[in-house]
Image (cartoon, grey):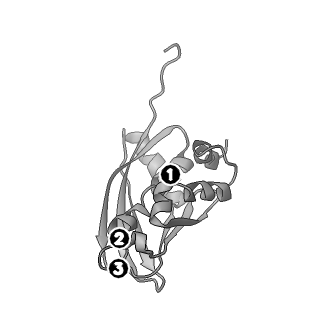
Amino acid sequence: MKNRSVLLQLLGGTQSSHSLRRWVNLWPPFVGMGIRVTHIAPNMKAVDVEMKLHFWNANDVGTHFGGSLFAMTDPFYMLMLMANLGRDYIVWYKAATIRYRKPGRVTVRAEFRLSDSQIDDVREKLKTMSKYEPVFVVEVKDDAGVVIAEVEKMLHVRKKEIEPPGQ
């Protein structure tokens, strides 16, 4: 089984990253906040997300609502790592922080990238540790490339316990 098919099966058995993108874009919290996934790489190592400013996702001073900025970064590093590690690992978000840098007044974007070395690092650490908690950082930027917010995501990763035969 290819690594990317793990996540695709979780989201309804679709067979392509294009189909996965459509499914994620229909997720009610994203629809409600105006969040849109614009790209998912077939190998699940790159995801691009954007959010336009609308009256329904603006705060009381007319800039992007902080909760929407945070939500647009929510599931991606976890899903990307799950897809690339495979079914022998458990991956959860453990903690997250957001630092707002500037008010968002236009379309904002976030690019999530997962390298082979990051994936290898997780596998190596779990050879000697019962759990590993890597931290990933993503910047939310406006059209001019100005950082609007910086989000840190701490993941909890461990290998699944294998039950002995006959259990």
- The amino acid sitting under disc 3 is Gly
Secondary element under disc 2, as helix, strand or loop, is loop
Classify 106 as above or below 136.
below
**Dot 2 surroundings within 10 Å: few (below 14), some, or many (20 or more)?**
some
Q: Can you tell which of label 3 and label 1 is closer to the viewer?
A: 3
Q: Earlier in the sequence, mark 3 or mark 1?
A: 3
Q: Residue at x 55, y 43 (%)?
A: 86
Q: Position of residue 63 (x, y in %)?
A: 35, 78
Secondary element under disc 1, as helix, strand or loop, is helix
Secondary element under disc 3, as helix, strand or loop, is loop
Q: CA distance from mark 2 to mark 1?
A: 24 Å
Q: Earlier in the sequence, mark 2 or mark 1?
A: 2
Q: Position of residue 167 (x, y in %)?
A: 48, 15
Disc 3 target residue: 62
Seen from the viewer's position, the closer of residues 119 and 111 is 111
Q: Position of residue 111 (x, y in %)?
A: 50, 69
Q: Which mark is residue 79?
A: 1
Disc 2 target residue: 65
For the view shown, which residue lies furthest in the top direction?
166
